[in-house]
Image: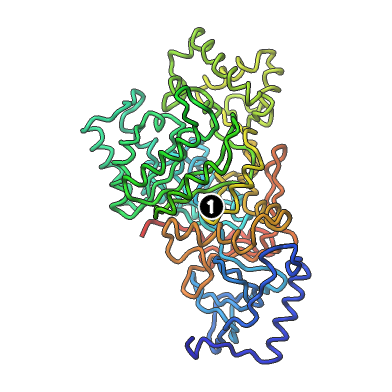
């Protein structure tokens, strides 16, 4: 260790640090062996003394979890402009001083699987409210969770033009940093329209490769697919391999909402979730690029498929040297367009094929959804966004059908035949399987949520509570994983996977994306019945050095940036 980096603790300084540790750990309960991962503190970690420097912000008395597996340590953090300029015992002045005693200090959280772009893309002229509404332009449902960076363009959805979307982010002066993925489905839709080819010919494939290359040149992080949705569901493995080879040439990655996340067993004996994970691995191997499996889960029907069967596939590929990860939200319910339950033959890129909107077609779809109701009954489908009939938002499919006096299957078919298909929440997972996936060191924490203006629609509570929920319920209460490990899954692990340089760690020279968290109060408050409730416990949040949350409340100042792959 260099002499300049050695500790300069005096006896008084050491006792002061120890006293603060006692206060912090008494408040948070972290000194108890009952909360694994919180007990080790690096009192002897080398902390340098910084004198004679002025800073824009100093965070004093910080108990720092730096985003890695390292033990937490005490230090001050000096911030100049948008960077962390110094970490140590700081004897200097600052325009703003934050006292972090009694809290923990972490990197701002990174959510690599969001749809924060869809509210802009899908709301028509209402998107101009993003310039006005503080909760929209500030991305408050994320900043109140401690999230400083999001990735958009997931599941093959979003803006096909990376420049256009990132330009909009900067124009709005968004509250969080934003990276973008090139969305395979939307690009394919724009190129081939409603009459989607099942197998691209050579000319079509070359045109797709050119479009993907254009988005990578604009700074997209990689390619995303949504293989349960049209038109992604029409794509072959070979097509995706060839497109991913283009992405590899730009140093990008492949992320996939896989073809089937359920335990469904097909006539030939293959299991939906297992074969879908195998396909994602095959694409990564053949194209030789990193792979991220989106929102890892096993959905109903379960058919006794175990989490270990999925994890074995992932771990085997990782042990063979593949750069493979998966991400997960800490809920047993998913959310998407309700048409997801229909076989692909009914779907177009914009909804349901016209030929199935006839009386005969509707009867056929009713039978298909009756089969679904055998394992996912209508009382487990909650309607959260229904632009044609807003009065039904917050009601289950069973309740809506009762209000209309018709069968649930008929009600469902009427909904999917709307011009804008409603979005629902589906209680289709086993919480024990969610727990079994969670603690592995290759699993990233994500929300699969979206920017939600306060009071708009009835969204899944994950859009407001993912990160605090995981910390409160699964780390502090259930002790499913250690606190440093959980923080890593939200910070340095996603930053490294997506090559976000200067993000995801508290380190000198890194960007000042920093959360100061009260472990005593950190929790989610959003529920399925009352989702529009901000999380609590994020006492301070800085985004590129801009203080976005102060003493638990939004300041109205926004430091987010549109960012591109390096």
Q: Which element carries disc 1, helix, strand or loop? A: strand
Question: In the picture provided, is 545 more to the left or to the right than 354?
Answer: right
Disc 1: which residue: 443
Q: Nearer the viewer, residue 420 or 255?
A: 255
Up/down of 58 relative to 480, above or below: below
In x, y percent, where is residue 227? 43, 34
Q: Residue at (59%, 37%) from the top-left corner?
A: 334
Q: Nearer the viewer, residue 396 or 373?
A: 373
Question: In the picture provided, is 551 more to the left or to the right than 3?
Answer: right
Q: Residues within 10 Å of mark 1 (few under 14, many from 20)?
A: many
In x, y percent, where is residue 307? 57, 42
Q: Residue extending furthest left?
A: 203
Q: Residue extending furthest top?
A: 360
Q: Nearer the viewer, residue 429 or 76?
A: 429
Up/down of 9 relative to 505, above or below: below
In x, y percent, where is residue 6? 54, 88
In x, y percent, where is residue 12? 71, 90
**Which quadrant of the rendered structure holds the C terminus?**
bottom left
Q: Residue at (58%, 87%) from the top-left corner?
A: 7
């Amino acid at each position: 260790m260099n002499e300049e980096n050695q500790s300069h603790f005096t006896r008084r300084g050491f006792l002061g640090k120890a006293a603060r540790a006692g206060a912090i750990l008494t408040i948070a309960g972290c000194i108890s062996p009952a909360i694994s991962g919180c007990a080790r503190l690096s009192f002897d970690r080398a902390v340098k003394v910084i004198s004679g420097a002025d800073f824009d912000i100093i965070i004093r008395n910080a108990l720092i979890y730096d985003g890695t597996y390292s033990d937490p340590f005490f230090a001050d953090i000096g911030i100049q402009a948008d960077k962390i300029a110094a970490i140590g015992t700081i004897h200097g002045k600052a325009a703003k001083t934050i006292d972090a005693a009694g809290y923990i200090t972490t990197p701002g959280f990174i959510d690599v699987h969001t749809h924060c772009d869809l509210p802009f893309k899908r709301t028509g002229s209402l998107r101009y409210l993003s310039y006005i509404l503080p909760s929209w332009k500030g991305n408050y449902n994320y900043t109140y969770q401690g999230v400083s960076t999001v990735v958009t363009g997931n599941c093959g959805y979003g803006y096909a033009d990376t420049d256009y979307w990132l330009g909009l982010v900067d124009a709005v002066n968004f509250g969080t940093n934003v990276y973008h993925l090139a969305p395979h489905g939307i690009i394919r839709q724009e190129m081939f329209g409603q009459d989607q080819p099942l197998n691209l010919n050579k000319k079509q494939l070359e045109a797709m490769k050119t479009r993907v290359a254009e988005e990578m040149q604009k700074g997209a992080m990689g390619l995303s697919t949504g293989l349960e949705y049209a038109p992604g569901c029409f794509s072959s493995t070979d097509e995706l391999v060839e497109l991913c080879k283009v992405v590899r040439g730009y140093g990008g990655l492949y992320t996939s909402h896989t073809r089937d996340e359920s335990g469904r067993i097909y006539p030939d004996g293959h299991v939906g979730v297992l074969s879908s994970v195998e396909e994602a691995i095959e694409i990564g191997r053949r194209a030789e690029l990193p792979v991220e499996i989106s929102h890892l889960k096993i959905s109903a029907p379960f058919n006794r498929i175990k989490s270990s069967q999925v994890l074995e596939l992932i771990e085997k590929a990782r042990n063979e040297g593949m750069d493979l990860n998966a991400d997960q939200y800490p809920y047993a319910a998913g959310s998407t367009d309700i048409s997801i339950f229909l076989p692909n033959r009914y779907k177009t890129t914009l909804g349901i094929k016209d030929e199935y909107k006839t009386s005969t077609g509707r009867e056929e779809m009713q039978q298909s959804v009756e089969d679904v109701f055998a394992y996912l009954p209508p009382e487990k489908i909650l309607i959260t966004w229904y632009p044609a009939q807003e009065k039904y938002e917050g009601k289950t499919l069973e309740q809506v059908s009762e209000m209309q006096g018709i069968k649930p299957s008929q009600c469902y078919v009427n909904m999917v035949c709307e011009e804008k298909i409603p979005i629902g929440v589906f209680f289709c997972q086993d919480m024990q399987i969610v727990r079994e996936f969670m603690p592995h060191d290759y699993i990233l924490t994500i929300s699969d949520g979206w920017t939600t203006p306060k009071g708009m629609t009835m969204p899944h509570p994950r859009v407001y509570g993912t990160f605090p929920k995981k910390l409160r319920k699964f780390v502090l209460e259930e002790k499913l994983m250690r606190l440093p490990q959980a923080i890593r899954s939200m910070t340095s692990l996603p930053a490294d996977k997506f090559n976000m340089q200067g993000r995801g760690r508290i380190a000198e020279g890194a960007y000042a994306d920093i959360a100061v968290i009260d472990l005593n109060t950190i929790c989610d408050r959003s529920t399925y019945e009352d989702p529009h409730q901000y999380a609590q416990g994020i006492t301070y949040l800085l985004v590129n050095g801009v203080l976005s949350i102060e003493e638990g409340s939004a300041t109205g100042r926004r430091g987010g940036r549109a960012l591109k792959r390096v």
